[in-house]
Amino acid sequence: MKIIRFTFVGLVIELSLLTSVLMGQTIQEVRIGWDAYRAPAPQVGPSTARPADIFTLLARRSLAGLLPRQRNPQISVDQIVILTVNVEGTEIDGQLIPDPRILRAEQPAPNGELRGEVLQHVNTELLITIPDDPTIAELRLYKPRWTGTTFVLDWLGAIPLR
Amino acid sequence: MKIICLGFQKLGTVTAVIILLITLTHGAWAEPITTIRNNGDSANRVDLVVLGDGYAVNEIAKYESDVESFVRGLFAQEPFTEYQRYFNVHRVDLISNQPGADHPERNPPVFRDTALDATYNCAGIQRLICVNIAKVNDVLSRSVPADQREVVLVLVNDNEYGGSGGAIAVASINSAVVELVLHELGHSFGLLADEYTDSPPSCNNIVEPPEPNVTKETSRSLIKWNFGGGSPTGWIELSTPVPTNSITPGVPGLYQGAKYCPAGLYRPTFNSKMRSLDVPFEQINSEQLVKRIYNWASPIDSSEPSESIVNLVSGQIQIFDVTLPQPLNHSLDVTWKVNGDTAATTEQFIFSASSVGSHTVEVFVTDPTVLVRNDAGGVLKQSRRWDIIVESARKLVAIDIRPKSDANKINLKSAQSINVAVFSINGFDAMAVDPNSVRFGAKGTEAVPIHVGRRDVDGDGTRDLVVRFRIQDLGIRCGDTSATLSGQTFTSLAIIGSSPIRTVQCKPSAPQPEENRSVSLGKQ
């Protein structure tokens, strides 16, 4: 269900949400703070800083809408894998999102080629949507690592949602 | 918010809904959002959302113009030109207290109070613009639906060249920055590697890179963009040497130097937008970008009928229909198949139910674009199948429940039976009905006959069929208002007939003086 949008959150949006709730077309939006590195600077070269990977649940809400769905997700080292796990430990949703730590600084060099650096934010956020399922227990976060032949998932952390 | 959500798990649905509404009324004001490219339902489009930073309240018209120019610039480059109708673009009108962006590198430093805190000289790199991610997420969360944020771009109201890539693309309004944003979309949207050789980042030519546009493989048939060893599924023509030393643009081959390594890694073309700005993406990167577009958008927007099982009567027609996204200069291929045989190649197909039995109708949609040669994931294809059940056409016949009574009352508690007459009338010969095929009841499928007679019930000089059923077999419930008889003739013509009924003895305590009479077999 599409939400009718107005300049401010008003009655129509609420009625739309109510309708969607009753029709079961709701999702949860989860916002997570991520202290990625033990470093004072706002951005770092990742090889120069010690990882911290402290996750904090900043906000969680139900809202009308549909989960974005990818037809053929491709994994990449520039992404984060997020698994939604229920109270029984079953994975009920998985998604790939761009790694919010990455900050690409690229510009043309005098020879016309690009040059640049890949920095990382020391502190960042994840804004994700997950199924609106009351049995959800936690989110599990992984970082894909390429071995030369396959991707392996390195553990980043878990965010309890109960 | 957290407290409210915890409360959810212990509350009923109605209470939870009320809490949701209360929570929303406490929500912040959402920014106005305008869809400036509306090419279809966001569920089947790539949605790009643009947030402006450093636009004061009197600069909204300028902001609208800047966004329009920027979006035109993005879609002026292939493959985004050809597939621009696969994108929606939403503009969030975000007002800043002051125009421009921070320039801490200037003397004296310049600081602006803007909505997203855009600042040049981020991490000490003059052209690198950073924004406040928390503030961006504030705007996205309160103003942009979750399925309309696949690509997020912050447009900064400053003419100085600058920007950054990552989960959120940032660009100044300097027109040259469009090229940089396209390159960054190559990373974040296309999952493409850099093809330039300057380091840092560090060179790693020890292992095969995962990205589709960089390889260390030098064997022609094993190069990832030369699947099958060459045309039609691979990109390197047999006449092109491997490795390739040509400097001709747009010739796929194996060019030394890529991903921060001057040697040991190879790129697919001499130059591309993943190596330099102001050049095309070229074939291999464009192929990947098209496949990534199809990661979010199916080649079928919608199809009708929505039900996957379609019941038809012989002689009936059914219209099948697909709605497709529209590339700019070519069309998607559509093939309809009935029972595996090609039946049509148009977007609409009319199925004629000429043959009784089960059938399948399938539609296959494929993007035949020349931009993609190897679609290993099958994302340029989509199909849908319907199961069709065709029943023979039914002849409507006249029936009479309790032929000797005007009142079609049925006592559902009765252990007795009931007669139903099928009339020979209007050219229909009830003697042609196969009694073994006859069923009677609430739906016409329930009771089997316990006795069959043939006599002239209506006195028209022709014999009618009189079939008797047990009342307890009829499947009729209190309050039902009609009953149906079905069956077929000895020549397999299906017949059906219905008649009104009135159920009685539904209330145990209520006296039903007429009931005994109505169930009397003696009057039949």
Image (spheres, rainbow, N blue to C red):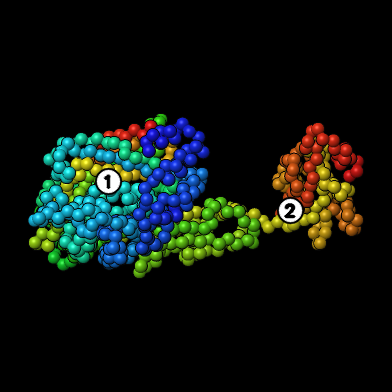
Q: Is residue B443 left or right of residue B102?
A: right
Q: Position of residue B412 (x, y in %)?
A: 78, 38
Dot 2 amino acid type: Ile
**Chain under disc 2:** B
Which badge, 2 or 1, comes first in the chain's sequence? 1
Q: Which residue is mark 2?
A: B496
**Chain under disc 1:** B
- Residues at discs 2 and 1 in contact (Cβ within 8 Å): no
Disc 1 crowd, CA 10 A, few/some/many (<14, 14-19, 20+): some
Q: Give me the residue at 63% from left, 61% from top.
A: B316
SS at mark 1?
A: helix
Q: Is residue B255 visible?
A: no
Q: Nearer the viewer, residue B200 or A16?
A: A16
Q: Position of residue B336 (x, y in %)?
A: 49, 61
- When asked about the image quadrant of residue B476, the answer is top right
Q: Give me the residue at 64% from left, 54% from top.
A: B391
Q: Nearer the viewer, residue A41 or A158?
A: A41
Disc 2 crowd, CA 10 A, few/some/many (<14, 14-19, 20+): many
Q: Which residue is mark 1?
A: B134
Q: Position of residue A24 (x, y in %)?
A: 49, 44
Q: Give me the residue at 58% from left, 60% from top.
A: B318
Q: Is residue B472 visible?
A: yes
